Image: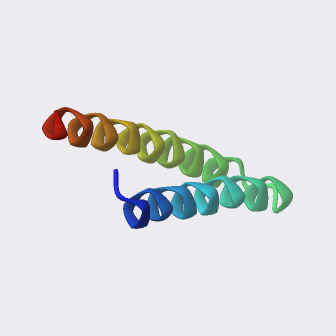
Amino acid sequence: MSKPLALLFAVIGTLLLAGISLFIALRQPWMVLLCAVIAIGFIGYGFVVKAKLRKRDN
């Protein structure tokens, strides 16, 4: 995975996790749940992209 793409996934994943903490502080459980599901899906998608790129390079 190229460094800019890895940085993009890291920054967006971090922002999603920060969003979870924000919504916890604002006491909005539905937004916490939504942001958590999106964060898990996005981080998982990052692993899938990394595996596909690694497989393509070999």
The picture places residue 47, in percent across and down from the top left corner, at 39, 37
Vertical side of 12 occupied by 58: above or below: above
Q: Quadrant of the C terminus?
A: top left
Left of 14 or right of it: where is 5?
left
Left of 28 or right of it: where is 1?
left
- Which of the colour schemes (rainbow, by chain, secondary structure, one colour) is used? rainbow
Q: Quadrant of residue 48?
A: top left
The picture places residue 50, in percent across and down from the top left corner, at 33, 41
Residue at x 43% of width, y 61% of height: 3
The picture places residue 42, in percent across and down from the top left corner, at 43, 47
Name of the residue lying farthest toward the front? 58
Numbered circles on residues, count: 0
Vertical side of 25 occupied by 1: above or below: above
Left of 5 or right of it: where is 34?
right
Vertical side of 33 occupied by 5: above or below: below
Residue at x 67% of width, y 60% of height: 19
Residues 34 and 52: in front is 52
The picture places residue 39, in percent across and down from the top left corner, at 53, 47
Residues 16 and 50: in front is 50
Residues 8 and 20: in front is 8
Residue at x 85% of width, y 58% of height: 25
Residue at x 39% of width, y 45% of height: 46
Residues 36 and 5: in front is 5
Name of the residue lying farthest toward the right? 25
